Amino acid sequence: MKVTVLGLWHLGSVVSACISSSGHNVIGIDHDAQTILDLNSSKAPISEPNLNTLINVQLNNNQLKYSSDLNKVKDSEILWITYDTPVDDDDKADVDFVMNKIKEALEFIDKKTLVLISSQLPVGSIKILEDYTDQNFKEKDITFACSPENLRLGKSIDVFMNPDRVIIGYRKESDRKKLIALFKPITSKIEWMSVESSEMTKHAINAFLATSVTFANEIAVVCEIVGADAKEVERGLKSESRIGPKAYLSPGAAFAGGTLARDVQFLGTRSSNNNLILPLINSIKISNDKHKKWIQNQIISNYKNINSLTVCIWGLTYKPGTDTLRRSLSVELSQWLYEQGVTVKAFDPVIHTLPQKLINKVELFLDPFDALSSSDILIIGTEWKIFKENITHIQNYKNKNLTIIDPNRFLSGLFDNDDINYISVGSHKNSLNKVRHTIANKKLETLGEHSALKNRVAIITGGSKGLGFQISKKFVASSAKILICGRDINSLEKACDEIKSLSNNDKHVHYKLCDVSNEKEVKELINEVIDIYGAYDILVNNAGVYGPKGLTEENDWAEWKKAIEINLYGSVLMCRESLPYFRKNNYGKIIQLAGGGATNPMPYLNSYAASKASIVRFIETLSYELMGTNIDANCIAPGPLNTGMLDEILEAGPEKVGLNNYSKATKQKETGGASLDHGANLALFLASSISDGITGKLISALWDKYYDWPKYLDELTNNDLYTLRRIVASDKGLDWGDK
């Protein structure tokens, strides 16, 4: 189809790139010449992951063009209106700007055209446009439809190309057929309704979300007073079936305006114009505006002379994944701090120039820790991942009276101790520590109870043989529901029958063929466990192979890569597909089998060693990404096991695996090796609630007293024991070799 996209800021640049990538011929039009120049150079007006690349590809494919010439409108079957609706500081929208731009474009239409409105306009706007068209352009056969925008900063392409659904309001069946063709490459999940209902739906969604945010934050304020924890209350709310796990109820910073505030304002204005009283909706802005001062109130209540303070702000943008400073609470906060006489320092990974209003008021740094140096307070303004990746460095400031103010609990769980004063919305001081100590006092004997994993659902890869089979039996005996997978149907069927004998319910044990290196099969596996049990809590990545044996230059390259695909890619892929579900439920356990290859060189088995070392570092890194999510990820070193993989070494012989490896394998076979129970017991420990908070570690099933670790969770979190790192001479007691 020939589609013209009118208005090329955030919404329009995303729509034009995405819809052209779906096979439509698209021309984007905007009145701003610089915007057109930038877009034709593959530079979007706003930062959005992969957007510039997508624009470049579509320009080169001649599927996409950009112009400021409104004459191009006449060639379109669909004119898609995507102007961002401007708002002032009071969240009042400049509706006339968008309406006038649309009316201007109507002049250039010379044939039957469907005008699709996605700009954020008040309900009734399309009826006004229809009346205007009937009066001025009746002969042109112009019709209108509405598809409310669904942008999410930092995720816009993914949300557009993989929508939960698309809302469309239309008048005529012929328009409906056009719209089906327009969206067919993207989705068939369309909610059809009247034009007015679609306009109103967008208002209702955003007003409901705004209500949820303000409600959660008001509850959080009460929690701070009474000693409750708002995140725990949130978890309780979401467990109520009438509310649900996807509810927008996270305590944190106020919403900063934009789409939520705009629709609340639309509803307030429309109700006022019609003499309606909407007490709930009209109170949202009042509550949210009050909560915008939460950080300021924390500073005032904790410090007598704030004009002597030095404050560091990490993150200036409206939200992560974008470079926009429009409506940024960090910018507003910086201005307020300066007015109080505070020394303000800032860092943002994508902002290298301060906005005009902050020049000579805020010092902008290129390194976050340079900005943090000599600061009294660190404020987390935007949740950029880079902050978590470097977070261990903050421990250097634990004895320097540093206060961290983190409204959204982005760094939750890292600084809930007395060394660093950590403040977040809805958290009473020391409440998290009390929970930790309670958990730490649990006895390991609990693991011996039949109900240790009651109501927990686990996927165990490679679950039909060796250690995976032993873990499967251990989990089922502890009342878990499991789905085992592998590549041998006969082994799976046999294992499943045996495991069922340990369960009180045959329906708690299932199996599925799956190659963990195959993306399609992994997706089907995850979907199946949720279809069967309606839940998913634990991933045990046990599937693995030794790969080719012999010298690197003599290895079969295809076999070498396949080992990497199974051991490394397969494990990462299982995590990748499991994490969205774990994140949604704010809970999950990832247990990764590692083995000797992670900690020692393994000549003649180099693909195995490389993959195992890589997966350990991946899990360690992943644990940083997952901080504050109640998702733990750890690796197990099970010790020398007498499994089928050991037989592979013996069958290959010393010429292929090296004399040293062969000799070790022979001795291990003779002595019996390590018991599979050691690895299975550790897996059970990590799968249970007793291990909550232990994450990012490589744990030996034979040598580590892991059952003591919950007692020392703070110390464990704040050091690098049992992780991969560079070993320096001093670690070995040497006084030479270090710089």
Image (cartoon, helix red, strand yellow):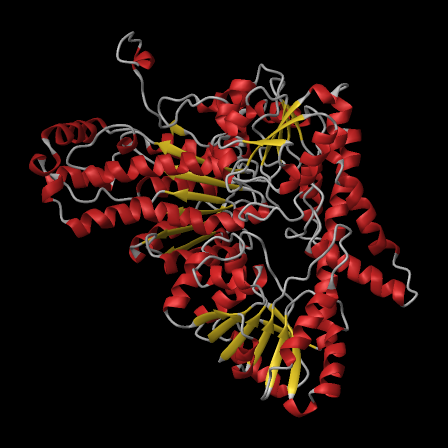
Where residue 61 sits: x, y (%)? 37, 70
Q: Which of 17 and 335 is in front in this view?
A: 335
User: What is the total number of numbered labels drawn onto the structure image?
Assistant: 0
> Going by the picture, which residue comes out furthest to the top?
735
Residue 664, image quadrant: top left
Q: In this view, does 269 lie above or below 709?
A: below
Q: Where is residue 727 in the image (x, y as percent from the top left)?
A: 31, 20
Q: Nearer the viewer, residue 35 or 367?
A: 35
Q: Is residue 478 visible?
A: no
Extreme bottom residue here? 139
Q: Residue furthest left?
A: 655
Q: Which residue is drawn at 26% across and 33% down?
A: 597
Name the residue furthest right: 275
- Position of 426 with respect to 468 (left or right) is right
Residue 716 in the image, given as x and y percentages of width and height? 49, 22
- Which residue is painted at 57% across and 23% down in the image? 440
- Above or below 96: residue 288: above
From the viewer's perspective, tell me whether residue 451 is left or right of residue 596. Answer: right
For this view, does 580 lie left or right of residue 116? left
**Left or right side of 643 for 451:** right
**Does residue 597 appear in the picture of this structure?**
yes
In the rendered image, residue 332, in percent from the top left (x then y), is placed at: 70, 39
Residue 680 appears in which quarter of the rendering?
top left
Q: Residue at x 53, y 56 (%)?
A: 45
Q: In which quarter of the image is the C terminus?
A: top left
Instruction: Please name whichever residue, 654 or 390, is drawn nearer the observer in this view of the structure.
Output: 390
Of 429 and 483, which appears nearest the observer?
429
